[in-house]
């Protein structure tokens, strides 16, 4: 990756991105405390520059191995989880705080309530996930003639970053009794792409897209009285 990428940042573009972040409006509501579940991961004096992070990801996405280049940017960001928390806040509800939604790249901070689960789903594009607070447990699935079969797992802790290939199918759990937050980056239009999810009990296929995923996060907050 270019080492001078941050020097060429366009202030006008930064303003556009910052505006988009403000409009996304999914950050936790202040004052709402989930009892005994808030534990800052780390403290640091720095604050992540979200606009610059997005710009770095956009530039990295133009590289030959875009996923690996973007993962480098992501790994650097979550290596300082305290700085990420200062920028996005401690998670206090399930949410998708969208930094960027474009045809070539989608970036958001996903926050998970304690013990929250997301059923098996595909993305149909590569995905990078970096954890800045809590933990995400992934079960990986493969499609076989007999149906969907679990074949692997990976526990992602704070500062971990993982890469999922285009054809990955995974389910996600926050195993902790507190909130988890991760930055999720996708090599395409995550919210506009029609995908597949699998019923967690029957493993029957169902259609999924950004609207379906947002609905799940909203219902999780309703279930816990966090709206
Ligand atoms: Fe996913």
Image: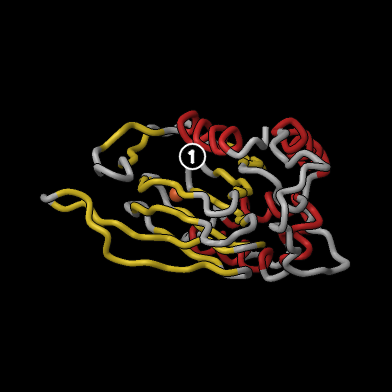
Q: Report x, y in % for residue 210.
A: 49, 33
Name the one closer to the observer, 66 or 25. Answer: 25
| Residue identifier under label 1 | 190
Secondary structure type for disc 1? loop
Q: Quadrant of residue 49?
A: bottom right
Q: Is residue 134 above or below residue 9?
A: below
Find the residue positioned furthest to the right. 45
Q: Report x, y in % for residue 187.
A: 48, 48
Q: Quadrant of residue 27?
A: top right
Q: Residue at x 39, y 33 (%)?
A: 208
**Quadrant of the snapshot with the N terminus:** bottom right
Q: Is 227 displayed left or right of 45 in the figure? A: left
Q: Is residue 88 above or below residue 199?
A: below
Find the residue positioned furthest to the front. 35
Q: Is 146 displayed left or right of 97 in the figure? A: left
Name the one closer to the observer, 147 or 177. Answer: 177
Q: Is residue 169 above or below residue 155?
A: above
Q: Is 60 displayed left or right of 163 in the figure? A: right
**Quadrant of the snapshot with the C terminus:** top right
Q: Is 137 displayed left or right of 39 in the figure? A: left
């Amino acid at each position: 990756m270019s080492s001078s990428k941050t020097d060429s940042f366009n202030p006008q573009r930064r303003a556009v991105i910052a505006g988009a972040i403000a409009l996304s409006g999914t950050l936790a509501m202040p004052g709402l405390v989930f009892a005994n579940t808030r534990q800052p991961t780390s403290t640091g004096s720095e604050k992540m520059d979200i606009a610059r992070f997005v710009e770095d990801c956009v530039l990295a996405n133009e590289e030959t191995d875009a996923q690996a280049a973007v993962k480098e940017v992501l790994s650097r960001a979550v290596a300082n989880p305290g700085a990420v928390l200062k920028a996005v806040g401690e998670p206090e509800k399930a949410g998708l705080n969208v930094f960027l939604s474009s045809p070539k790249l989608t970036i958001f901070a996903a926050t998970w309530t304690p013990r929250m689960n997301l059923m098996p789903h595909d993305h149909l594009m590569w995905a990078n996930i970096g954890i800045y607070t809590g933990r995400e447990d992934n079960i990986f699935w493969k499609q076989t003639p007999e149906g969907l079969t679990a074949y692997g797992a990976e526990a992602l802790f704070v500062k971990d970053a993982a890469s999922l290939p285009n054809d990955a199918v995974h389910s996600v759990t926050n195993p902790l009794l507190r909130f988890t937050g991760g930055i999720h980056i996708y090599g395409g239009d995550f919210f506009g792409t029609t995908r597949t999810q699998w019923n967690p009990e029957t493993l029957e296929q169902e259609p999924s897209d950004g609207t379906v995923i947002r609905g799940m996060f909203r219902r999780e907050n309703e279930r816990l009285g966090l709206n």
